[in-house]
Image (tube, rainbow, N blue to C red):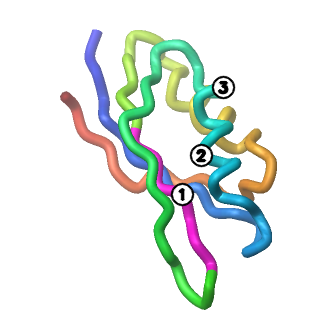
Amino acid sequence: MGRIVAQYDLMPESTDISLESVVDALGGIIPKGVTIIETKIQPVAFGLKKVVAGFVIDDSDDSIGGKLEDALRSIPGVENVECISTALL
């Protein structure tokens, strides 16, 4: 059993989406075995912003990555989810 640290970009559907509500939704949707370690809102371009979220993932469940990405995609207003980095702890 190992632990992985991963960072994800969550892109909103439009500039009208409240990114604070996206951040607030994270705590209620992440699967067991995943811990949020950071969240921040960063500018992208032309007024568009994204949520960058960092997680520690217990990889004892082989499908935990897919479960996490499915949960992130289920947040209302999130159009795209991309894993931008992973590393073993």
Q: Residue at x 61, y 36 (%)?
A: 26
- Closer to the chain start, of discs 3 and 1, is 3
Q: Quadrant of residue 25?
A: top right
Q: Residues within 10 Å of mark 1 (few under 14, many from 20)?
A: many
Q: Secondary structure at mark 2?
A: helix
| Residue found farthest to the bottom | 46
Q: Secondary structure at mark 1?
A: strand
- The reply to whether dot 3 and dot 1 touch (C-beta < 8 Å) is no
Amino acid type assigned to the residue bearing label 1 in the image: Val
**Vertical comparison of 20 with 63: above or below:** below
The disc placed on residue 60 is none
Residue that badge 1 annotates: 51
Amino acid type assigned to the residue bearing label 2 in the image: Val
Residue 46 in magenta stretch: no
Residue 18, given in percent of the width and then of the height, sits at 72, 60
Q: CA distance from mark 3 to mark 1?
A: 16 Å
Residue 83, given in percent of the width and then of the height, sits at 46, 50
Which residue is nearer to you in this view: 27 or 13?
27
- Closer to the chain start, of discs 2 and 3, is 2
Residue that badge 3 annotates: 28
Q: Residue at x 76, y 39 (%)?
A: 74
Q: Quadrant of the N terminus?
A: top left
- Closer to the chain start, of discs 1 and 2, is 2
- The reply to whether dot 1 and dot 2 touch (C-beta < 8 Å) is yes
Residue that badge 2 annotates: 23
